[in-house]
């Protein structure tokens, strides 16, 4: 009788633990799908057209909620980025208002933005954004480098050798372009931890107009804006890779010189010993 009660209790405990496990499996976060990026690898570079399209998507869609505090308008004209012309940057900046001051009367005032100003946010602080949106959207300045995921064994051993650093953009692409699959729940996302995200699907086909003939699809929008976010997070990526290549070439040459110098020194020493 005691044994039967023990078995019954064990069965109940097993069932109780199985339910959370089943629920957890139901909302298991999927691993982001690896995409092809022009800036991947040790010799990769940004696609200027892609960055310019990505900026338009960011400006027309993402910046309605998200901020980019580290971005100054002049950065858009600097080498290694979207490389808009200085005239384009000045015209773009002038479309925005920024707070300045105090003036001669001791009060703050608004003026048209200049290239040196940072990209303004629609909300003065995270609390104001939370009050309107229900949650404070993260700043996008370094979002592409802040987001990551585990690729598991043995890929995490291979990644340093293949220079895989696209965790963030792969995650962003999968989250936006592939994650929203539940028509009944607009906040369900199979790539977001927990399976539920505060942001409903932000992009739809034809939402942003392209002037270069690129497809106006969610997949293209997401790929472009993810690449743009990668540039915002690491604007010196191309310069870093060029510097790294020069350093590696120098180290290889230096190692060769050391080898032959050592060989010659030991050859002379060996000859003296025999003498």
Image: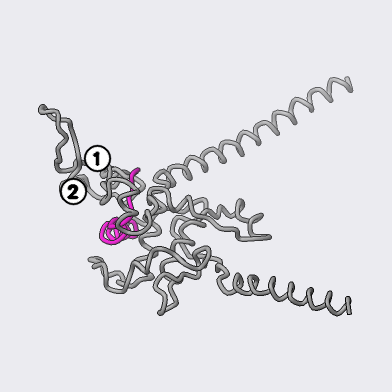
| Residue at mark 2 to residue at mark 1: CA–CA distance | 10 Å
* Residue ID at (88%, 76%): 2
Say whether residue 70 is left or right of residue 39: left
Residue 185 x, y percent position in the rendering: 42, 75
Q: For this view, does 140 lie left or right of residue 123?
A: right
- Secondary structure under the numbered disc 2 in the rendered image: loop
Quarter holding the N terminus? bottom right
Looking at the picture, the colour scheme in use is one colour
- Point out the image quarter for the C terminus: top right
Left/right placement of residue 216 relative to residue 39 reads left
Q: Position of residue 243 (x, y in %)?
A: 48, 40
The answer to which quarter of the image holds residue 47 is bottom left
Q: Does 155 appear above or below 255?
A: below
Q: Quadrant of residue 25?
A: bottom right
In terms of depth relative to the viewer, which is nearer, 249 or 152? 152
Residue position marked by numbered label 2 in the rendering: 96
Q: Seen from this angle, which residue lies furthest left?
A: 105
Q: Tell me whether the residue at label 2 lies in contact with that at label 1, contact meaning CB atoms closer than 8 angstroms.
A: yes
- Residue 238 lies, in percent from the top left, at 43, 46
Tag 1 secondary structure: loop
Question: In this view, which residue lies farthest toward the front?
Answer: 1
Find the magenta span and give its range.
49-70
Q: Residue 149 has which mark?
A: none
Q: Is residue 73 left or right of residue 12?
A: left
Q: Residue at x 69, y 73 (%)?
A: 16
N-term mark: 2 or 1: 2
Q: Is residue 157 above or below residue 71?
A: below
> What residue does disc 1 label?
117
């Amino acid at each position: 009788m005691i044994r039967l009660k023990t078995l019954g209790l064990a069965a109940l405990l097993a069932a109780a633990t199985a339910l959370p496990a089943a629920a957890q499996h139901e909302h298991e976060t999927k691993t982001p799908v690896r995409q092809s990026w022009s800036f991947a690898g040790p010799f990769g570079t940004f696609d200027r057209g892609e960055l310019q399209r990505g900026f338009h998507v960011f400006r027309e869609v993402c910046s309605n909620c998200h901020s980019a505090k580290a971005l100054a308008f002049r950065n858009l004209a600097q080498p290694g980025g979207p490389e808009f012309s200085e005239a384009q940057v000045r015209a773009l900046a002038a479309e925005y208002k920024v707070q300045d001051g105090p003036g001669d009367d001791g009060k703050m005032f608004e003026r048209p933005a200049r290239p040196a100003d940072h990209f303004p946010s629609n909300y003065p602080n995270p609390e104001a954004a939370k009050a309107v949106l229900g949650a404070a959207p993260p700043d996008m300045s370094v979002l592409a480098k802040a987001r990551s995921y585990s690729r598991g064994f043995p890929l995490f051993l291979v990644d340093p050798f293949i220079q895989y650093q696209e965790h963030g953009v792969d995650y962003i692409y999968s989250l936006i372009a592939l994650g929203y699959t539940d028509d009944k729940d607009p906040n369900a996302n199979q790539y977001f931890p927990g399976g539920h995200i505060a942001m409903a699907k932000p992009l739809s086909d034809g939402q942003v107009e392209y002037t270069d003939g690129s497809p106006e699809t969610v997949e293209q929008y997401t790929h472009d804006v993810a690449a743009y976010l990668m540039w915002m997070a690491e604007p010196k990526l191309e310069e870093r890779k060029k510097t790294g290549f020069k350093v590696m070439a120098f180290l290889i040459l230096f190692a060769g010189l050391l080898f032959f110098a050592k060989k010659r020194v030991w050859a002379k020493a060996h000859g003296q010993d025999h003498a």
